Image (cartoon, rainbow, N blue to C red):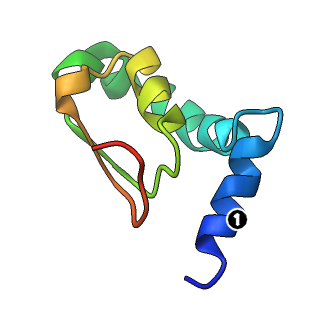
Amino acid sequence: MSGTITHNRKELEKDDFGSSRRTIRLLNPLSSLEPVYSFAAQLSVLSIGPRTEMEIFHLMGIGFSFKNIRAVDLISSSP
């Protein structure tokens, strides 16, 4: 975990809002699955290591309900 905070800070300072490209690469395949895009509002999802809230926002954009999204990371500024 050495350097984690420094790395995350550098990612957040980039013009592409941190991990947005990573998030798109991870979630686009998920969002293309028929059971996901048809039933996302009823499904629960766990985001492991989102680093920023970007993954949560993208999951909501796919159709997941905010109340059904859980996220866990080692360091977070949000509950």
Residue 15 appears left or right of 73: right
Could you tell me which secondary element the residue under label 1 belongs to?
A: helix
The three-letter amino acid code for the residue at tag 1 is His
Image quarter in which the N terminus is found: bottom right
- Rendered residue at 34%/26% (across/down): 36
- Rendered residue at 20%/35% (across/down): 44
- Rendered residue at 45%/58% (across/down): 49
Q: Is residue 43 visible?
A: no
Q: Position of residue 48 (x, y in %)?
A: 39, 56
Q: Work out which residue is located at the far bottom of the displayed protein and give it.
A: 2
Residue linked to disc 1:
7
Q: Position of residue 75 (x, y in %)?
A: 43, 62
Image quarter in which the C terminus is found: top left
Residue 68: quarter of image:
top left
Relative to 51, residue 39 above or below: above
Relative to 22, residue 8 above or below: below
Q: Could you classify mark 1 by the number of other residues whose Cα lies within 10 Å: few (under 14), some (14-19), or many (20 or more)?
A: few
Relative to 6, residue 44 above or below: above
Q: Is residue 7 visible?
A: yes
Q: Position of residue 69 (x, y in %)?
A: 26, 35
Q: Work out which residue is located at the far right of the displayed protein and give it.
A: 15
Q: Position of residue 57 (x, y in %)?
A: 46, 25
Relative to 31, residue 39 above or below: above
Numbered circles on residues, count:
1
Q: 21 or 42: which is nearer to us?
A: 21
- Rendered residue at 49%/37% (across/down): 55
